[in-house]
């Protein structure tokens, strides 16, 4: 099971908010708090897979790390600097060229029909219907931009993709999924308290979804609010 499949979207959002609140209590600055959280997740992904797997409670590790970074910043009050390296904002992860090319080969009506089947399954919380619309070799890619703890590697296979999408997107308390236009094609936008928390687009071949692209990076979601 991937990291993305191990946590629900609500849990990931609550985890990020928890870390932000730690830094806000220390500094009272949204900008500094955001830097602390980004550096916390950077250190998480700097661990190798075995090291991350050995951490029984990731939230506890992240909390301790965020606290340590806050103490480092108290010693060096420049909010753009953390001892050992400068905090840098994650670069946007572009869609692979195959994603755009795949769209170009599909007939608009076909994509619309298949994407709506996928979105309807997510809205209904129907994991079986979701699995049926996925190609056997489907892939899911999630982009947290280093600001949400999601898997850094793609997940392959209809069953695995269905598990990840179910954990992240289906039956999330307080989250409202709605079919909407994503990059000019039919997709899914999830909102919580009026703000977008996830945007989903799909690649289609024939009558199946071949790839699911989930954007969780808060910076990329602002235009959907």
Image (cartoon, rainbow, N blue to C red):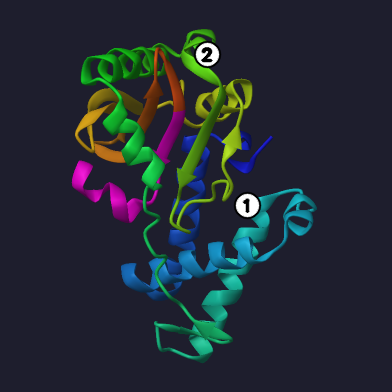
Residue 12 image offset from top left, x and y in percent: 51, 44
Q: Residue 151: say if magenta.
A: no
Of the two numbered discs 2 and 1 in the rendering, the one whose residue sits closer to the viewer: 2
- Residue found at the far front of this picture: 105
Is residue 38 positioned above or below 207 on the image? below
Q: Is residue 212 left or right of residue 64?
A: left
Q: Which residues are magenta?
A: 211-225
Q: Which mark is residue 129?
A: none
Q: Quadrant of the N terminus?
A: top right
Give the residue displayed 33% in from the left and 71% down from the top: 31
**Rendering quarter of residue 6:** top right
Q: CA distance from mark 2 to mark 1?
A: 27 Å
In the rendered image, which quarter contains the C terminus?
top left
Image position of 153 (left or right of 89): right
Which residue appears at 38% of the width and 23% of the height? 204
Question: In the picture shown, does residue 224 fall above or below 73?
Answer: above
Instruction: Reply yes or no: does residue 217 show up in magenta.
Output: yes
Q: Position of residue 3 (x, y in %)?
A: 63, 42
The answer to whether any part of residue 200 appears in the image is no
Q: Are marks 2 and 1 in contact (CB under 8 Å)?
A: no
Q: Which residue is denoted by mark 2 in the rendering?
A: 127
Residue sitting nearer the eye, 76 or 97: 97
Residue that numbered label 1 is attached to: 59
């Amino acid at each position: 099971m991937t990291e993305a499949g191990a946590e629900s979207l609500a849990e990931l959002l609550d985890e990020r908010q928890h870390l932000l609140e730690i830094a806000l209590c220390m500094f009272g600055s949204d900008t500094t708090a955001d830097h602390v959280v980004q550096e916390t997740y950077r250190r998480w992904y700097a661990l190798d897979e075995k090291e991350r797997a050995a951490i029984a409670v990731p939230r506890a590790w992240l909390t301790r790390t965020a606290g340590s970074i806050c103490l480092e910043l108290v010693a060096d009050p420049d909010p753009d600097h953390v001892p050992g390296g400068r905090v840098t904002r994650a670069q946007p992860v572009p869609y692979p060229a195959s994603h755009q090319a795949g769209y170009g080969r599909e007939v608009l009506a076909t994509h619309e029909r298949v994407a709506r089947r996928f979105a309807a399954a997510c809205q209904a919380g129907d994991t079986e219907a979701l699995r049926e619309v996925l190609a056997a070799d489907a892939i899911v890619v999630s982009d947290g931009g280093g600001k949400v703890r999601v898997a850094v590697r793609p997940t392959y296979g209809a069953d695995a993709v269905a598990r990840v999408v179910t954990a992240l997107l289906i039956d999330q308390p307080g989250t409202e999924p709605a079919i909407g236009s994503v990059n000019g094609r039919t997709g899914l936008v999830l909102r919580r308290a009026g703000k977008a928390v996830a945007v989903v687009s799909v690649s289609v071949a024939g009558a199946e979804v071949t790839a699911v692209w989930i954007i969780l990076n808060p910076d990329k979601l602002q235009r959907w609010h």
